[in-house]
Image (cartoon, rainbow, N blue to C red):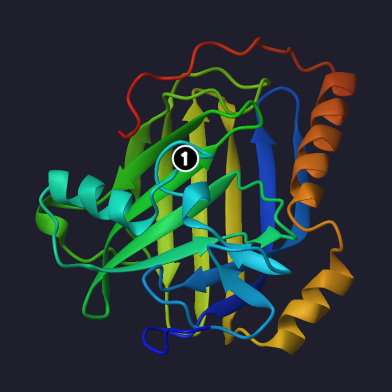
Amino acid sequence: MTVATGHWPEHLHGQTTHARRGDIRHAFTHSVDFVLIDPDAARGPGLFTRNRAGLYSVQDRHHGGPPKAGRGAAWAREVLAARGLTGARLMLLTQPAFIGRVFNPVSFWLAFRGDDLVAVISEVTNTFGDRHSYVSAHPGFAPIIASDELQATKVMHVSPFQDIAGGYRFRFRITPARIAIRIGHENGPHGVVATLTGTRRPMTNATLLAAAIRRPLGTARTWLLIHWHALRLKLKGAAYRPRPEAPLDEVS
C-alpha cells in the first residue's frame, strides 16, 4: 500500500438472513464476510488490495455504475450531489472480491455528516448481471437513526420467484461497534425480509486468512447459495418468473 491516509478498513464476520413471506415459506441464515472501507484510501493489511489483484480486494470497477464498468466513489458523490448532498464522508460496505472473483447481491454506500448517517445508496445486483441502486435519505438529509424506516418502490427484477411490484422498507443501524441492516420487500401478503448484521473489527491479515479458511470460495459461495435456494423454492412449488428488461434508470 502506498497511501497512508484515510480510515483503516474493517472486517465484518457477519450473518445474513432471508425469510420469504406468502403461501410458500422459505428461510435461511448464512454467515458472510463484508468489509467496510474508505473508498478514497488505500490503507489495509497486505492481503487486502484496492484496484488490483490480491487475495481479497475491492475494485472501483465493481461498484458505482454498471457491474463491470463502475466508477467507485466518484459515481456515488455524483448521485448524492444530484439530490442536494455534497461534502459528505463516504464509506463502502461490501463483500470483497476473492482472488479476483466477486458477486455482491447488495452493497451499501454510507454517507455521513460528522458521525451522523444521512444517506445510503443500496447498490443491488441480480444474478442476471443487472444493477439498480436505491437512495435512502430524509428530506434535508436529516440524520438516519435505527428506528427510521425509509421506503422505495421496487423497480428491478431480483428473485425470479418474486414480482417486480410493491416496495422496499430499509432500516439502518450503524454504530461504532456494530452494523445492522434490514430490507423488507412488501407486495401485499408476499415478499421477503433480509437482514445483514455484524460486529465491526479492524481488518488484519489474520481475519482475512480466517475468512479464506471458513469460506474458501469467497463470493462464489454467495452465487452458489442463491441458486441452491432457488432450486429448493422451485421444488416447493414456487412459480418462476422470466427475467424482464432491466430498468432504464440507474438510480431511484
Decide if residue 222 is on the left or right side of residue 147: right
Q: Residue at x 67, y 50 (%)?
A: 102
- Above or below residue 40? Residue 94 is above
Locate residue 216, reporting x and y percent. Answer: 87, 63
Residue 194 or 160: which is nearer the viewer? 160
Q: Give the residue type that dot 1 points to.
A: Ala
Residue 35 or 58: which is nearer the viewer? 58
Locate residue 71, reporting x and y percent. Answer: 38, 49
Question: Where does the C terminus fall, quadrant-wise?
Answer: top left
Q: Mark 1 points at which residue?
A: 69
Locate residue 25, reporting x and y percent. Answer: 75, 32
Q: Residue at x 47, y 72 (%)?
A: 37
- Above or below residue 38? Residue 21 is above
- Above or below residue 134? Residue 50 is below
Q: In which quarter of the image is residue 134?
A: top left
Q: Quadrant of residue 70?
A: top left
Decide if residue 29 is on the left or right side of residue 70: right
Residue 173 or 122: which is nearer the viewer? 122
Q: In which quarter of the image is residue 135?
A: top left
Q: How many marks?
A: 1
Q: Is mark 1 on a helix, strand or loop?
A: loop
Q: Residues within 10 Å of mark 1 (few under 14, many from 20)?
A: few
Locate residue 158, reporting x and y percent. Answer: 58, 28
Q: Which residue is drawn at 40% across and 76% down?
A: 41
Decide if residue 97 is on the left or right side of residue 174: right
- Above or below residue 232? Residue 214 is below
